[in-house]
Amino acid sequence: MSDWREQTRLFDDEPYNYEYSTLVDLIRLAKGKPNALIVALDHITDAGNMGAIVRSAEVVGATGVLIPNKRAAPVNDAVYRTSAGAVEYLPIAREANIAQSLKRLKDEGFWVGAATEHAKQLIWDAPLEGRLVLVMGAEDTGISRLVRELCDFEFKLPQKGYTPSLNVAQAFTAIAYEYLRRTTRP
């Protein structure tokens, strides 16, 4: 590779060579921690949203991110750039079946919460502490029916304006900081 190609690698279409983790890796990393956040992305296909979510998750100290093999943005150059390099510090597990992965996480003592604009409960009343899997869905289709049925609770962000919802990455950032506030209180 020429010096020019090496210096501009992140600005071309050449794929970023990312080594995915597994669900078992995420479970191992959370072992023994009273507070552990795993972010499950249910069919987030936009690289910008994926990168922004990974960036926010890493900043608040999440244990990792879980994505499906299909219908999900892969970790590529666009995700790397949008994450500001956070993909280098936060494990991302790519599994065939998100629903089965959620079942396994529940067996390991995690609560599963879904962020959805259709929830009745506001974030202020949701149990966002401890070992938590936070499920975020695609902007156009939301969280799939099967994944939603596996969630222990649902919540939404309050709003006063007329816009129906935030961008998924913006919503995640607000939620992540509420989790951080609750789990780092003196």
Image (tube, rainbow, N blue to C red):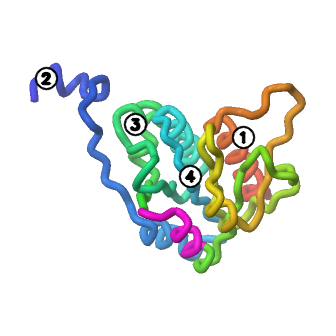
Instruction: Check disc 3 and report the residue beneath it.
Output: 80
Mark 3 belongs to which amino acid?
Tyr
Magenta residues, start to end: 96-105
- Answer left or right for 156 relative to 61: right
Percent position (x, y) of residue 164? 78, 32
Distance of mark 3 from mark 1, alpha carbons? Answer: 21 Å
Query: Sequence order check: which comes first, mark 4 or mark 3?
Result: 4
Q: Nearer the viewer, residue 23 or 129?
A: 23
Distance between the Cα atoms at labels 1 and 4?
A: 18 Å
The amino acid sitting under disc 4 is Asp
- Contact between marks 3 and 1 (CB within 8 A): the answer is no
Element marked by disc 2:
helix
Disc with the residue nearer the chain's start (2 vs 3): 2
Q: CA distance from mark 4 to mark 3?
A: 19 Å
The mark lying in front, picked from 2 and 1, is: 1
Camera-near label (1 vs 4) is 4
Q: Is residue 55 left or right of residue 163?
A: left
Camera-side residue: 156 or 6? Answer: 156
Marking on residue 42: 4
The dot on residue 3 is 2
Report how far apart the C-alphas of labels 2 and 1 lie in the structure.
41 Å
Q: Residues within 10 Å of mark 4 (few under 14, many from 20)?
A: many
* Kind of residue sitting beneath label 1: Ala
